[in-house]
Image (cartoon, helix red, strand yellow):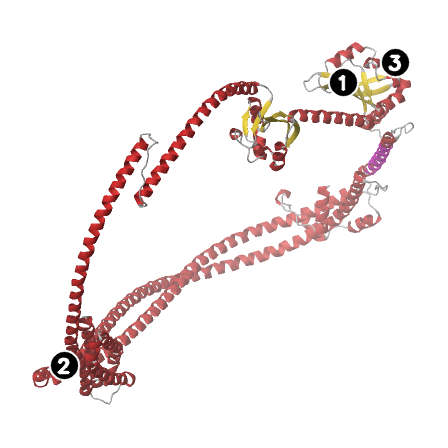
């Protein structure tokens, strides 16, 4: 059926399409590209469908294959000839056949396909009728067989069900008796079928239940007896457990597997107190989950402990250490009445605090021993007395000091013995012990005092010795013999008082002084001598300076501050001498300068008058220049306005060109779209031409009946060709129009660019004219300022003339003051070279100066002294610094 209704018609359809396309390809070789592509797409479809139809026909049956051998050979031969020509057209684009012959080859393939279709239908109908007859016969035989089998099955089922119901009823009766508790039934077992096996199972079940009932009765009797004994044992165990729970000993009980089954309150309190440390060191330790836990949680090597406990036969004592905790364990094995080990009872004792206290006491004892040894070897003189002021300890340093001072101390205390101090009361050092006893008894902190015994000066530092509760245990006293120190202090005070009064001639006696005190006395004597010599030298130089004698200096060598003082005094004298010499030289220079200033002022007055005349002429010229510059500025502003108008006009033209460019682009886009539409019309005309060609071929094949249709197809083809020609001409016109529009667009774009450049150039000209206008305004303003400056210079010139007269009078006054200064510095005595210089500079003033002296001098307060030479300025600065 698939061959007739689907496979074969599709093969004929693809062959007919190949026929029309191949004929068109031969007829229209200049435009063959689209047709060749169509042939490439249709060829595999047509070949595959033809072969599929032929294979389907051959597989139908042997009789059908024999009936269709001729048709199959015919269609294959026709298809091979047609496909060979098609392949040539595809490969070369040409064919030796014309379109009519190519169409005829394709028609042979189509006709052969129709012939196969007509021949295969009767063959397939006969084959179908034969198969229907065979199916009807098989259906009748199957129905008869099913009826017989069904009857036999019903008979067997009735018999089997009846036997099963009888056996099941007996089995149900036995099971009901067993359910009621009757386990003495006599079960009748017949045969070996399934019901018999079921009866055997019921019989076995009854025997098993009976045996179980007898064992349960016996076990219940035994359990009743055991429960009575267990009740007595439980009451006794409860009394023991209550006693263990209330006792102060930390008790833990474990069973034979070392699982903890009892913890009394004492061990719980102990473990609670150490819970934090135990949980941090023993990861498996949880106090609230300890009951039921194995004792291995307390050991890092559980295997060793487990073996030791399992073999335990008597009391075992040990210590375990967990971090900083120490526990004492006493393990006692427990045995039942049969002598078998039933568990372990462990007594715990926390030794941590006790061991820490013992270690602390040992550390204190060792520390006391170290302190005793340190005191014995200390250079500090130390004495310790108990709470009754009885001396219990003196170190070696104190014994040596007291032995050395013993002869002096006996002057006031005749019974004093340095080797009998230990055991004696501290009152042996005091004539009035009551005061000292009260002071020591009330001592709460450090107390320092000094005593004088037999000419010996002692400094005492007493500190109370208190225990941890603040109770006084005794007193520790540090002794220091200050006798030598006090003597040197008195001598030092005497020379310090003399030095404070200006007497540096005193010194310390070095006899009887050793060590530090000898070095101190020698150093003070050297300080006093150096200070005395230095002050004497300074006094000598300053006294000569007061007399005007600048020839005295300090020649001795000193160190430190005295060295600096020596250098400063000598430098001061040297500077004074240099300053006086420079003043003498400067006075002569000032006199000469004053005369020259007077002469210069006369020349300056004449030039000032000439300058005033020139300034008047300059002011007149500047007024004329101002008018010309102002006119230039006005013209520049007018030109600037014209340039701005030109910029606005050019920008408007640029905008118009931009709009023209946009319009040209729109026209160009529309022309391109028209060209696309004409291309579509051209393709439609081409397809119409192909259809007309196919129609003409079919009309020719139809003969007389297709003549009218052939005439119509020819007219359609002519119209299609005319449409294609017109579309081609329109397409050429549109292409030419597009090219011209693109050229116009390019010209408009160039015009826009040129206008933009013109706008930019006009803007540049406008900016330049604006700059010229701004510069002209600035020049006008500058000329006005120059006029003002010239007016001010004219006024200042007039003032300068008056000041020149004043400067001339000031120069005469300066010369007079210089001569007075030379008279004043004549007070100082200088060395020989300075005296010679003084004689050379003391000359009479020139005649010009004397002549100018008759002119009235301006007030000195209005004059500014001329700058002195560089060396004189340096000398003046140093003198002011001094």
Question: Residue at the spot x=19%, y=54% of the render?
Answer: 150
Give how far across and how far down residue 678 sits, in percent: 20, 76
Give how far across and how far down residue 609 sits, in percent: 56, 56
- Magenta span: 522-541
Give how far across and how far down residue 144 sits, in percent: 17, 60
Q: Residues within 10 Å of mark 3 (few under 14, many from 20)?
A: some
Q: Which secondary structure, mark 1?
A: strand
* Residue at mark 2: 695
Q: Residues within 10 Å of mark 2 (few under 14, many from 20)?
A: many
Residue 782 in the figure: left or right of residue 659? right
Q: Earlier in the sequence, mark 3 or mark 1?
A: 3
- 785 to 565, vertically: above or below: below
From the image, which quarter does the C terminus lie in? top right
* Residue at mark 3: 413
Residue 502 in the figure: left or right of residue 49? right
Residue 869 in the figure: left or right of residue 167? right
Q: Which mark is residue 510?
A: none
**Front in this rendered view, residue 6 or 702:** 6
Dominant SS in magenta: helix
* Residue at mark 1: 475
C-beta proximity under 8 Å, tags 2 and 1: no
């Amino acid at each position: 059926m698939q061959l007739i209704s689907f496979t074969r018609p599709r093969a004929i359809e693809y062959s007919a399409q190949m026929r029309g396309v191949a004929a068109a390809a031969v007829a229209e070789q200049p435009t063959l590209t689209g047709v060749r592509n169509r042939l490439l797409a249709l060829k595999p479809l047509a070949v595959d469908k033809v072969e599929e139809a032929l294979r389907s026909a051959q597989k139908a049956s042997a009789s059908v294959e024999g009936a269709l051998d001729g048709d199959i050979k015919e269609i294959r031969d026709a298809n091979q000839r047609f496909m060979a020509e098609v392949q040539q057209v595809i490969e070369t684009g040409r064919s030796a056949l014309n379109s009519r012959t190519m169409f005829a080859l394709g028609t042979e393939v189509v006709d052969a396909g129709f012939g196969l279709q007509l021949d295969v239908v009767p063959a397939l109908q006969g084959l179908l009728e034969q198969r229907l007859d065979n199916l009807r016969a098989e259906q009748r035989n199957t129905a008869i067989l099913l009826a017989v089998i069904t009857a036999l099955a019903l008979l067997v089922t009735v018999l089997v069900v009846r036997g099963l119901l009888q056996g099941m009823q007996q089995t149900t009766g036995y099971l009901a008796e067993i359910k009621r508790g009757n386990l003495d039934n006599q079960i009748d077992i017949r045969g070996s079928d399934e019901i018999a096996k079921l009866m055997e199972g019921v019989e076995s079940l009854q025997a098993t239940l009976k045996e179980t009932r007898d064992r349960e009765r016996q076990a219940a009797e035994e359990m009743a007896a055991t429960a009575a004994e267990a009740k007595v044992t439980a009451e006794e165990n409860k009394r023991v457990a209550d006693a263990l729970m209330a006792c102060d000993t930390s008790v833990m009980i474990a069973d034979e597997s070392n699982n903890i089954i009892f913890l009394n309150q004492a061990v719980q309190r102990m473990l609670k107190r150490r819970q934090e440390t135990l949980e941090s060191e023993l990861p498996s330790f949880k106090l609230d989950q300890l009951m039921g836990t194995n004792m291995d949680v307390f050991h890092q090597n559980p295997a060793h402990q487990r073996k030791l406990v399992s073999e335990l036969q008597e009391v075992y004592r040990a210590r375990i250490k967990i971090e900083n905790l120490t526990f004492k364990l006493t393990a006692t094995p427990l045995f039942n009445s049969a002598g078998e080990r039933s568990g372990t009872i462990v007594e715990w004792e926390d030794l941590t605090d006790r061991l820490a206290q013992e270690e602390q006491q040992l550390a204190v004892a060792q520390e006391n021993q170290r302190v005793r040894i340190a005191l014995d070897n200390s250079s500090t003189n130390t004495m310790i007395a108990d709470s009754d002021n009885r001396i219990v300890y003196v170190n070696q340093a104190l014994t040596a000091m007291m032995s050395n001072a013993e002869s002096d101390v006996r002057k006031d205390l005749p019974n004093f013995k340095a080797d009998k101090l230990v055991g004696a009361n501290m009152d042996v050092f005091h004539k009035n012990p009551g005061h000292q006893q009260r002071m020591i008894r009330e001592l709460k902190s450090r107390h320092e005092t000094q005593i004088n015994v037999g000419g010996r000066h002692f400094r005492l530092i007493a500190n109370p010795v208190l225990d941890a509760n603040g109770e006084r245990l005794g007193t520790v006293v540090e002794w220091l013999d200050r006798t030598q120190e006090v003597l040197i202090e008195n001598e030092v005070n005497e020379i310090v008082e003399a030095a404070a009064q200006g007497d540096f001639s005193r010194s310390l006696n070095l006899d009887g002084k050793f060590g530090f005190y000898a070095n101190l006395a020698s150093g003070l004597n050297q300080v006093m001598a150096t200070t005395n010599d230095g002050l004497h030298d300074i006094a000598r130089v300053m006294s000569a300076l007061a007399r005007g004698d600048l020839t005295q200096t300090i020649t001795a060598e000193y160190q430190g501050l005295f060295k600096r003082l020596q250098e400063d005094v000598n430098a001061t004298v040297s500077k004074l001498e240099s300053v006086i010499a420079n003043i003498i030289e400067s006075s002569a220079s000032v006199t000469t300068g004053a005369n020259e200033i007077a002469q210069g002022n006369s020349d300056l007055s004449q030039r000032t008058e000439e300058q005033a005349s020139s300034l008047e002429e300059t002011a007149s010229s500047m007024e004329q220049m101002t008018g010309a510059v102002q006119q230039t500025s006005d013209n520049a502003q007018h030109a600037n306005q014209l340039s701005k108008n030109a910029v606005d006009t050019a920008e408007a033209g640029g905008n118009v060109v931009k709009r023209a460019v946009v319009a040209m682009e729109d026209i160009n886009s529309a022309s391109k779209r028209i060209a696309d539409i004409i291309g579509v019309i051209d393709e439609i005309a081409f397809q119409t031409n192909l259809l007309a060609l196919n129609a003409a071929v079919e009309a020719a094949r139809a003969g007389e009946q297709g003549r009218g249709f052939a005439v119509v197809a020819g007219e359609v083809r002519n119209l299609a060709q005319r449409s294609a020609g017109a579309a081609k001409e329109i397409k050429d016109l549109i292409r030419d129009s597009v090219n011209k529009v693109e050229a116009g667009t390019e010209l408009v774009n160039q015009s826009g660019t040129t206008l933009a450049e013109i706008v930019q150039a006009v803007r540049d000209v406008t900016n330049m004219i604006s700059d010229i206008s701004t510069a002209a305004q600035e020049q006008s303003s500058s000329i006005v300022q120059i006029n003002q400056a010239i007016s001010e210079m004219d006024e200042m010139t007039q003032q300068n003339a008056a000041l020149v007269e004043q400067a001339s009078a000031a120069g005469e006054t300066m010369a007079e003051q210089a001569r007075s200064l030379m008279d004043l510095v004549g007070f100082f005595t200088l060395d020989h070279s300075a005296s010679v210089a003084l004689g050379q500079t003391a000359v009479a003033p020139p005649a010009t100066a004397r002549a100018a002296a008759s002119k009235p001098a301006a007030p000195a307060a209005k004059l500014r002294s001329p700058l002195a030479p560089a060396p004189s300025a340096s000398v003046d600065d140093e003198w002011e610094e001094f």
